[in-house]
Image: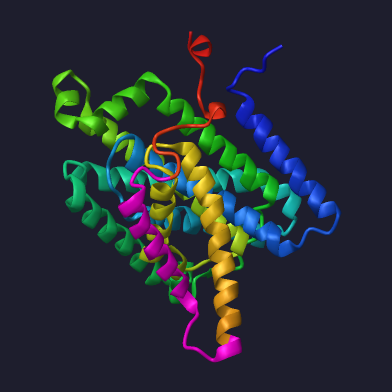
Amino acid sequence: MKIPRTPWLLVVAAGFWAVVQLLRLVGFNDYYLFIANLSLVYVILAVSLNLINGIIGQFSLGHMGFAAVGAYVSGSITTLIYKLSPNVAAHYPGFVLALVAGGVAAALVGVAIGFPTLRLKGDYLAIVTLGFGEIIRTIFNNIDAVGGPRGLLGIPKFSTFTVILAFALITVAVIRNIAESAHGRNMIAIRENELAADLVGIDTTGYKVKVFALGAFFAGVGGGLYAHLLQIAHPTQFGFIYSVQVLIMVYAGGVGSLTGSVLAAFALTILTQVLKSFLSWLKAATDLPIGGDWYMVVYALLLILIMLYRTEGLMGTREAKLMIIPEEDEK
């Protein structure tokens, strides 16, 4: 009996969960578990940005601004609940609702940004989204109620491996199904030729606003998971450099390929941690003035090489078979 391809996402996720749990039983280092959790958070961020930049063909540079909204909103809610009652196990339903609230708040910000700006295209849209991302981060940096420049501290660590994996699976499944639907084909038509799509009756502006809101929603959920993993939401966690990092994941994996975004999120998150460890070791061994964000030099070189030699990225617009809904399943 053939297993339909739609549940293959669940099969792969269950296999990944089982492997990690097995490794933990034999002494899996907590640091490696943290990298796995961080990779899954970046899967959510990269896939949601690919919906905007890849599937509908817009160009957003402020994605981490939406993640900041989700982090601060969900973190504020769970911190308040945890102070009232520190029974962690009883608060997971509230944690899920807090993540959804953070995602909704980010989506509303996305709509607020989308209506006045999504008539812009290309570089102009990129500059505006970059500006809005920095505005959001600066606002949180100046609100004392959420910690201001100190950041929002005391966030309970509700982001476990199982929880993050579940939300990553939901994100990929939802966006995959949208991309394979009639709405997804309309989005691709807008990406390929917006004027032609408009002439055949596709509501181009409406689609762009909805996609921007949906991408912002999942970015907000990812930001909430990120804050509950690190137990802090700080303005510096959501700066321009991290938006570029997610953007590179999208372009390295292939614009329009959700499979590519997933693979690039894992590969570049691991690469980042390896580079940070190597630079720290090199600085200690040689006293060279390196460290901090020097790993971004490698990211910049990687982006240049992609643009020069493989503009389509790792996967181009192709998807792994587990990401595709076969025609017989659509009928």
The answer to whether residue 106 is left or right of residue 173 is left
Taking the magenta stretch, the answer to whether it contains residue 312 is yes
Does the segment drawn in magenta span residue 79? no
Q: What residue lies at 56% left-to-right and 90% top-to-bottom?
A: 286
Q: Is residue 7 left or right of residue 207?
A: right
Q: Where is residue 24 in the image (x, y as percent from the top left)?
A: 80, 54
Left or right: 331 in relation to 311: right
Q: Is residue 231 above or below residue 192?
A: below
Residue 130 position (above or below residue 104): below
Q: Is residue 135 above or below residue 26?
A: below
The answer to whether any part of residue 217 appears in the image is no
Point out residue 266 in the picture as x, y percentages from the top left corner. 56, 51
- The image shows a total of numbered marks equal to 0
59 shown above or below 279: above
Q: Which residue shows up at 58% across the image and 59% down it? A: 270
For the point 74% across and 62% down, which residue is it?
30
Q: In the figure, residue 318 lies in which quadrant?
A: top left
**x, y percentage for residue 25?**
85, 52
Q: Where is residue 132 in the image (x, y as percent from the top left)?
A: 28, 57
Q: Which residue appears at 40% of the width and 45% of the height?
A: 313
Q: Tell me, what colour scheme is on the image?
A: rainbow
Query: Is residue 90 rendered to the left or right of residue 61?
Result: right
Q: Quadrant of the N terminus?
A: top right
Comparing 297 with 189, the one in front is 297
Query: Is residue 183 shown to the viewer in this render?
Result: yes
Residue 257 location, quadrant: top left
Which residue appears farthest toward the front when viewing the image? Answer: 309
Q: Which SS type dominates the magenta stretch?
A: helix
Range of magenta residues: 284-313
Residue extending farthest right? 26
Q: Nearer the viewer, residue 220 or 273?
A: 273
